[in-house]
Amino acid sequence: MKSFHTFFLSMFGAVLLLVASAQAQEAPAEPVSVALPNVMDVRVSATPERARLVIDLAGRTEFALVSLAEPNRLAIDVRAATFSVPEPSGKPSGEGMVSDYLVEQAAPDRVRTTLTLSGAAQVQQAYMLEAFEDQPARLVVDIIPATPEEFAANVARDLAASGTAAPPVAASSTPAGGSELPIATRPLVVIDPGHGGIDSGAETPGGIKEKDIVLAFALRLQELLVASGRFDVALTREDDTFLRLEERVALARTNKADIFISIHADSFQQPEIRGASVYTRDENATDVLDKVLADSENKTDIIAGFAMPQMAPEVVDILLDLMRREMRHQSFTLAQAIVHQLEPSVELRRFPVRQADFFVLQAPDVPSVLVELGFLSNADDMANLMQGDWQDRTADALARGISTYFDSITPEE
Ligand code: ZN
């Protein structure tokens, strides 16, 4: 597999070079622009257990995180020329770890957001997302409680690192309390909680909605994966908003995600069908029931009144095909790794690794799987899905499956 991969990459590189040189002959080279982006919006939300800062930017840029004492604060610097934030100071939505925030131009090339903390806190993860579709680039910073000792250590470390004027600006994320460690690039896992907003997904007669169950589960899984210290984890949606299928795929692709996992808990007309299963994409779905399931998922976009987007241009068809074959293989490996970990502790469907034509799994360059946690149309599954213990067990098994997948693809030293 490794040699195929190498072959594939070099083939791909060669063709890209051909395309690039063809383009270079057509148009004169444009001067390289080094303009710094504008900070467009800042949003802060807080609970007693965690807080999140999202900074919308006109483009990707570098950032740095600094802990400050008296009062306890966390400053987030982004390399930016200006800011045009609707509310440059205020209170977060929700109450908890952050009491207020302030955005200011700290230097000509630096916009600083300062969060006043209501206690000791630390950054759990921070990552920059590329702009895609009509969404701007974003810096996401997740904050969790720390001990006073941990906070004091971070303050001392950042003070020592800053030395003179501006604090160091890192291009990558700084894990909680550990910026003295070499910053390694961690694999990016994109979790996609299905449905959202006007699209509720499956729904029980009692009013339990798939969109809520899968969002809660995705947040749980994100926490487990982040806590392992091995991954950066982005969600396609973090609240009850509607996203087109194309947008979900685009978020994973533009950020060069290492894997994409869509989470669902759908309904079948046959209430006896139950158990978890993991799907990879196949345009020729293997099973009539799988086809029905995929068709109803793909309807999401039609429900919201959007047309299905066009596929990639014909010129890249051969490349895409080659890439898809490789991604299909990796997606299948990922699905198997997840099922293997689910098996001992979670009720599975017969033949739990399945293929269906899910549009959301179409990225040709990101291994993608869709996990059906169970079926809302089955009473036993529904009881499980509502139960915290079952959710924990299942999220834990999924996280282990993801880890073993990365173990299996990491080349041995
Ligand atoms: Zn669904």
Image (cartoon, rainbow, N blue to C red):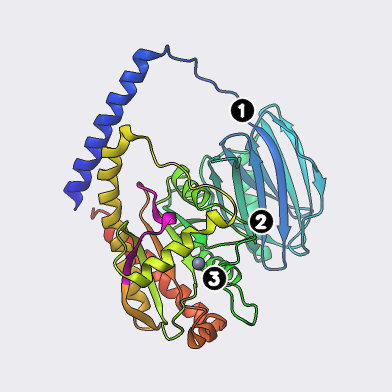
Earlier residue among tags 2 and 3: 2
The part of the chain drawn in magenta is 353-364
Classify mark 1: helix, strand or loop.
loop
Q: Amino acid at mark 3?
A: Phe
Q: Is residue 84 left or right of residue 186?
A: right
First in sequence: mark 3 vs mark 1: 1
Q: Residue furthest left?
A: 3
Rendered view: 88 above or below 367: above
Relative to 232, does residue 33 appear above or below in the rendering? above
Residue 50, position in %: x, y?
Answer: 66, 64
For disc 1, the marked residue is: 36
Q: Amino acid at mark 1?
A: Leu
| Badge number at residue 18 | none
Q: Residues within 10 Å of mark 1 (few under 14, many from 20)?
A: some
Residue placed under numbered mark 2 in the picture: 52
Q: SS at mark 2?
A: strand
| Crowding near the residue tagged with mark 2, few <14, some 14–19, many ≥20 C-alpha atoms within 10 Å | many
User: In the visual, does 213 lie left or right of 110?
Assistant: left
**Does residue 162 show up?**
yes
In the displayed structure, would residue 218 be above or below residue 65? below
Q: Is residue 44 left or right of residue 35?
A: right
